[in-house]
Image (cartoon, rainbow, N blue to C red):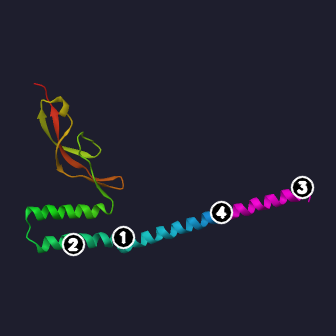
Amino acid sequence: MDVRWDQALDSLEMDRQAIIDCAERLRASLASLKSDSRKIKDLATGEAYAGLFSELLLAVDRVKNEPLSEDLRSSIADEIIEVCSHYGLESVLCDETVNLHEHEIVGLIKTDDAFKDGKVARVERDGYRIGGRLLRPARVVVFRHEED
């Protein structure tokens, strides 16, 4: 066989493979678009939140039908946070050091211990984030070192 024919056949084979690769990428893009379209439809019709709402309504039923003791109030709050965590809600950590990106300082407590300076003394209100986005900062009271 002539060298030119071999080169022409090799070129055609490379073109055929490029077309197959392109078709595969288009199929994957179409599948992704269909998935995104379903998600948008679910959001528009409320279906995306049906599971969340069903679970939260159980907590609402408890509030309406049971006497509200402090233990019940705490239990319901914990239940709601747990349900929301199934949908991506995360608590803001308030372990020790203040993080001004996630904490709102609402008070200071004087201390003579320099080690405690800038550390969280207590949490007044929990903070939450979802998908890396801060929904609300944690409100914290912070130790402030003051020398005598």
Q: Earlier in the sequence, mark 1 or mark 3?
A: 3
Residue occupying the point 22% across, 64% down: 80
How far apart are the two marked residues, 2 and 4, measured between alpha carbons? 50 Å
Quick one: SS at disc 2? helix
Q: Please give the residue where the numbered disc 4 appears in the rendered image.
A: 22
How far apart are the two marked residues, 2 and 3, measured between alpha carbons? 77 Å
| Amino acid on which disc 1 is placed | Ala
Q: Position of residue 53 (x, y in %)?
A: 28, 71
The local crowd at label 3, few if under 14, some if 14 to 19, many if 20 or more residues have their Cα within 10 Å, is: few
Q: Please give the residue where the numbered disc 1 appears in the rendered image.
A: 48
Foreground label between 2 and 4? 2
Q: Please give the residue where the numbered disc 3 appears in the rendered image.
A: 3
How far apart are the two marked residues, 4 and 1, measured between alpha carbons? 33 Å
Q: Which residues are magenta?
A: 1-22
Residue occupying the point 19% across, 45% down: 140
| Amino acid on which disc 2 is placed | Leu
Q: Earlier in the sequence, mark 4 or mark 1?
A: 4
Whether 13 is among the magenta residues is: yes
Residue that extends furthest to the top in the rendered view of this protein:
148
Q: Earlier in the sequence, mark 1 or mark 2?
A: 1
Residue that extends furthest to the right in the rendered view of this protein:
2
Q: Which mark is residue 58?
A: 2
Foreground label between 3 and 4? 3
Residue occupying the point 74% across, 63% down: 16
